[in-house]
Image (cartoon, rainbow, N blue to C red):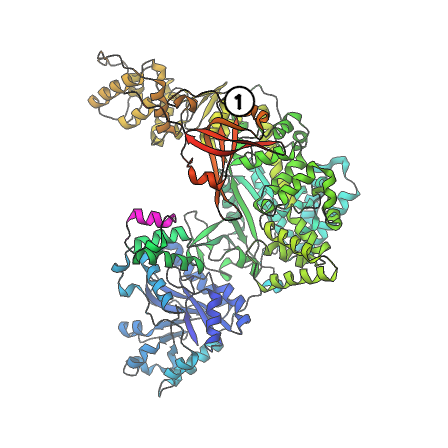
Amino acid sequence: MLLNCHSYFSLRYGTIPEEELLSLGRENGYGCMALTDINNTSGCLNFIRLASKYDMKPVVGIDFRNGIAQQYVGLAKNNAGFQALNTFLSQHLNAKTDFPANAPWLENTVFIYPFERVRQERKELFLPNEYIGVSVKDLSRLQFSPLFKHKDKLVIQQPVSFRHKKDFNAHRLLRAIDRNTMLSKLYADETAEEAAQMMPKKVLTYHFNQKDFDRIIYNTEKLIDECSIHFRFGDDREHQNLQVFGESKQDDYQRIFQLGCDGLRHRYGSNVNDVILDRFNMELELIEKQNFIPFFLVNHSITSYARQKGYYYVGRGSGANSIIAYLLNITNVDPIELDLYFERFMNLYRKNPPDFDIDFSWRDREDVTQYIFDTFGKKGQAALLATYSTFQHSAAVRELGKVFGLPAYEIEALSNGKYDPKKLDQYAGLVIRYANYFQKNNQPNHLSIHAGGILISERPIHHFSATDLPPKGFPTTQFDMVIAEDVGLNKYDILGQRGLAKIKETLEVIRYNRPDAPEFDIDDVKKFKKDPNINNLIRQAQCIGCFYVESPAMRMLLKKLEVDNYLGLVAASSIIRPGVAKSGMMREYILRHRNPERRGEAHPRLLELMEDTYGIMVYQEDVIKVAHYFAGLDLGEADVIRRGMSGKFRGRDEFERVKKKYFTNCREKGYDETMTQEIWNQIASFAGYAFAKGHSASYAVESYQTLFLKAYFPLEFMVAVLNNGGGFYGQELYIHEARMLGGNVLPPCVNHSLAQTVIEGKDIYIGMQFLNEMEEKTIDRIIQARQTDGPFTSLNDFLDRVVISIEQLTILIRIDALRFTGIDKKTLLWKAHFRLSTTPVKVTQRQLFESEIKDYELPVFHSSPIDDAYDQIELLGYPLCSPFDLVKYPLPPSVMSKDLHKYVNQEIVQYGYLVAVKNTRTARGETMHFGTFLDQEGQFIDTVHFPSVKVKSNFSVKGVYKIRGIVSEEFGFLSVDVTEITRMDSATREK
């Protein structure tokens, strides 16, 4: 009966979540509803999935609009009609063209034109699938309209967009946000009518049961009866992914079998044994039974293309638990060596294929994505996955602040929570009120793109969703990964990271800077695992720049765990995740690791299940093991718990059912209720954050590769780190690390530098691209001139050969990029201004004879290292000298980090240069900080700032600080519990 309902996926228009729409329909007596969001299908599949829960017949379609103006509503008679509507919508969204005034003829669809538009445009001819939509407000005009004669074409079109008045108010705010205008300037015709609220079915039919209008009810019910759409979800869902990779399923089996056999020879050589063969055969049988062979072959195709192109990649996720993936070179982790739990990767109860997250260099990822679409998307079967970007509180406050016309400073204060609720005026109060409303409603703001998810389906993607075409240029679904999984579509994760780019570039830097270096295989990780020099770096936590192991938290954990081997690093990679620490299990793991007798405190069954982690859940597999073996759930139910703990499925009926069964089974097994609840709390606290063991192992492989490069080619490695965006820290720390490793770090030089940072021996020249406001075209001209005619010999020679503005030249002179001239910067600036003010910038031409430039005698200018440092701070963001050189007054003697062990539990004073700050909250919700500083010798100072200290100090600004505190030692890791912190005055420029 309701043929034009909007959910909150009518972006910046609707306000009702799709499930609440169904619930509201049932409460008001409806047995059928049509979800027709505006130019969007994000909610359709979930609407269909949930409809049976409310005993509702679902109909889906699209409200086609040009801007706010409704053209027509399209309804799908069946799945084929839904695909046709999705294709039509996608064509116009992708081309960014308006919808035509008349709907196209699409089989298995129905189009409903709004009465008022038909009346105004005097439309008289209608196709068999076209109708006129009449709302309650149209009835008074209908009986006097020429359109009344089209009695068989009239249907009820009563729009539903809101639950209540507050929704309508929120709608007006959303429309103002969308129009980027103040609420007071929003025209009435840019919003819906307040009456677009759901009225009870009895009331709606009462209006249309008047004489001469009852035919409209009949037409509407008849139209609804013609519509039927069906998708299968959950445990009953179809396998919607690519069904056949090659010519046939038999061909696919032969292909994967042969690839596996080749991989056995390559990976294991003569060491193939029964354990390996049994695992190989078991996996292959299950993969075939689950029809996942194409999934493996597609991933193999992707990684084969990468190897052919020379792209580095890392295969991770639960798929790294698979020996087939290892043999097909999708992953580089041996599941036999690590005894990886097969059932996390796949089991008969698990409906989804294993997760393969394949990381590529951020420079290579787009080409790999293009390969996937060129190879598998020619028939519209490939698309990127969307995500929903919702209104978070801070962003909502900023948008609403503009809508209400608040000044910028007030919006900033409201956004940062720096206000007294009792002192807010009317408009500020409304901003906070509706920002909270949007956040509580989980209101979508716009569609975004999943970090790496790509779908490759058997049917065209438009069978499931319309697609957008974002700037990346690849079609993108309008639903997210949760809905995709619900309907049987499984994503391929193609991700970009900078760690792999660092590895690749380091090898290139080694080739040009150390051409005589011995050959090595960067993939020979087995050799790296046994290398004492690499393991020593891990033990000392000297891992700055190395993948996943450089953060202050990881540096602390490595020291506390005394990690000095690959398996220890694998465990640390998962223990560092938020959930393990939150549950208190990180500390317990460290205690049991360092004190073997404490391991006896674990429950005997848990210790048996997780012997290598001392009876503590560290990996995702551990959740499945505990749920399956400890609580007696089957493997499918155990996987529901694992997935549910991510938050995406929590609250769903299937999750709540399995949760209840967990407690029932534990009670029947006679477990202590307190222990049962405690174990559940552990699962709940970390399952959504923990890694699969194979995933952690894959990360550890990449960590070892970068650690090898740092151990043997430290300067070349740091150059690559700088050129690929650094890592956890800002660029300044990597400059510091390069200097600590023996590098001579120099500012850019027009005779040596490129756009990126380069190295000559031990001299590291910072790249010109890192200079603020330096233009790419200027850099290109400098490099081209140098490559064509050799190094520059003077300022005049430089200006004769390079077209450059005075602004760009000033940047180069101030950073001392023309120091080869031997002339001080201030003199060069005078000469540059004189030369460029008398000679306009023009295209350079090679001259047969050098023209004489008049040289004026200038006074002697004075400059200082302080001036140079401030120029560097302004142009690079940091000084190239020691930051302690910029302190206004000499620092008194203090304790260095290397001597902290002598002062445990004593108060000391240190002077440290701020590197990083981490904010966190205590159990009471109070804010505290962890700080990372460098002392005068370049070693780290780790500080803890409890709430009482945090209130009295602010140390978020860069600079040197005086740190007073008590030295604390835990598991061999030293830190300072700060009692007082003061920023030291900085020296000023000389005038």
**Is residue 119 toward the left or the right of residue 16 in the image?**
left
Outermost right residue: 274
Q: Position of residue 675 (x, y in %)?
A: 69, 54
Task: Pick the quarter of the image with the N terminus.
Answer: bottom left
Q: Residues within 10 Å of mark 1 (few under 14, many from 20)?
A: some
Percent x, y of residue 809: 30, 24
Quarter of the image with the C terminus is top left
Start-end of magenta stretch: 405-418
Q: Position of residue 774 (x, y in %)?
A: 34, 30
Does the rendering let one see residue 194?
yes
Residue 311 in sight from this viewpoint: no
Foreground of the two, 590 or 949: 949
Residue type for callout 1: Leu
Q: Which residue is mark 1?
A: 741
Q: Is residue 526 above or below residue 583?
A: above
Residue at the extreme front of the image, as rendered:
906
Q: Could you tell whether 259 is left or right of 54 in the image?
A: right
In the image, residue 589 above or below residue 37: above
- State the residue at coordinates (74%, 62%): 668
Does residue 139 appear to the left or right of 958 in the view shown?
A: left
